[in-house]
């Protein structure tokens, strides 16, 4: 199967999250074979990122969105962690600062977009301004309702200037979220992630689902598609995202550049240096 095709949201599609099973894991897959495939994909991803960085003509922006405990940090570690940090970075968008609030909502986003040759991962993104903002009535409807079109225009401009965009919604079930909260409580290494807000936000579960449904439907475009990734099984989440990223990078018009120096002259100098330092001609 093609996870790109199966999980990609067609433009202008009406999205209902109840139609997507967060526990889906592909009947032909089990965890161990998936981990083997993931490792192969990670290696290929590393190769493609090296080519992207060397080519310096295009860039890749990956947006990760999810409800609390959805697995964004896990994707960064287990999937994108294979990329070389020299050409890859993560940008996190939390509650906006006073300075950021004094600008247009896309101002802080614009500053973090990738330069040519770079891969940037948004851990949360500009979509928070049509999700949290909408659910908690932080700005009037007449303001946030215009942001879908503004986001589409923003992403269209990025693509026109050589940035490819992939957007992943990590879809988990309500019961799975609660189980992950429990795991954080039980694991001393994860307790720092727990906050009272995690549980307080659960009462807005249906509101967030509706906000996501609208955002996914309004802003999945041919040039910047949204993917709904079943994420109750972390290994399947990683497999699907890895495959989509690799297939996307393989379709980019990138290649290793030709040398900018005279190789024959460099080889001559190399052999001359070896002869001088070792006495071997």
Image (cartoon, rainbow, N blue to C red):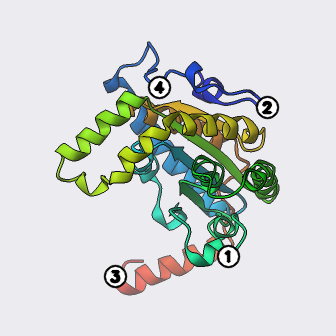
The residue to which callout 4 is attached is 22
Q: Nearer the viewer, mark 2 or mark 1?
A: 1
How many neighbours does mark 2 have within 10 angstroms: few (below 14), some (14-19), or many (20 or more)?
few
Q: Are marks 3 and 1 in contact (CB under 8 Å)?
A: no
Q: Nearer the viewer, mark 3 or mark 4?
A: 4
Instruction: Name the element at disc 1.
Output: loop
The residue to which callout 1 is attached is 102
Quadrant housing the N terminus: top right
Residue 102: give x, y in percent of width and height.
67, 76
Distance from label 4 to label 2 (Cα)?
Answer: 22 Å
Whether residue 17 is visible: yes
The residue to which callout 3 is attached is 278
How many neighbours does mark 4 have within 10 angstroms: few (below 14), some (14-19), or many (20 or more)?
many
How many neighbours does mark 3 have within 10 angstroms: few (below 14), some (14-19), or many (20 or more)?
few
Distance from label 4 to label 1 (Cα)?
Answer: 38 Å
Q: Taking 24 as reference, is 144 above or below it?
A: below
Instruction: Name the element at disc 4.
Output: loop
Q: Which mark is residue 12?
A: 2
Pick whichever, 103 or 122, lies toward us: 103
Res 268 quadrant in image: bottom right
Distance from label 3 to label 1 (Cα)?
Answer: 65 Å
Distance from label 3 to label 4 (Cα)?
Answer: 64 Å
Whether residue 70 is visible: no
Distance from label 3 to label 2 (Cα)?
Answer: 69 Å
Residue 273: give x, y in percent of width and height.
45, 83
Q: Taking 53 as reference, is 254 above or below it?
A: above
């Amino acid at each position: 199967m093609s996870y790109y095709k199966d999980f990609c949201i067609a433009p202008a599609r009406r999205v209902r999250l109840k139609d997507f099973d967060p526990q889906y894991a592909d009947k032909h897959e089990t965890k161990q074979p998936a981990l083997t495939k993931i490792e192969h994909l990670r290696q290929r991803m590393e190769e493609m990122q090296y080519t992207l960085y060397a080519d310096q003509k295009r860039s890749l922006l990956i947006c990760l969105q999810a409800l609390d405990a959805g697995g964004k940090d896990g994707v960064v570690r287990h999937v994108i962690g294979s990329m070389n940090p020299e050409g890859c970075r993560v940008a996190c968008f939390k509650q906006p600062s006073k300075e950021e609030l004094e600008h247009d909502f896309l101002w802080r986003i614009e500053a973090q977009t990738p330069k040519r040759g770079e891969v940037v991962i948004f851990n949360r993104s500009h979509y928070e301004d049509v999700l949290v903002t909408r659910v908690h009535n932080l700005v009037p409807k007449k303001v946030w309702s215009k942001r879908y079109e503004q986001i589409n225009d923003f992403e269209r401009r990025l693509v026109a200037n050589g940035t490819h965009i992939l957007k992943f919604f990590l879809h988990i079930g309500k019961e799975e979220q609660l189980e992950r909260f429990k795991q954080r409580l039980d694991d001393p290494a994860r307790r720092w992630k727990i906050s009272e807000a995690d549980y307080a936000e659960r009462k807005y579960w249906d509101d967030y689902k509706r906000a996501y449904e609208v955002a996914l439907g309004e802003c999945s475009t041919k040039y910047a598609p949204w993917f709904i990734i079943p994420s109750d099984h972390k290994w399947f989440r990683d497999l699907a995202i890895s495959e989509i990223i690799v297939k996307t990078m393989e379709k980019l018009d990138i290649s290793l550049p030709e040398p900018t120096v005279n190789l024959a002259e460099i080889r001559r100098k190399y052999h001359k240096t070896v002869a001088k330092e070792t006495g071997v001609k």
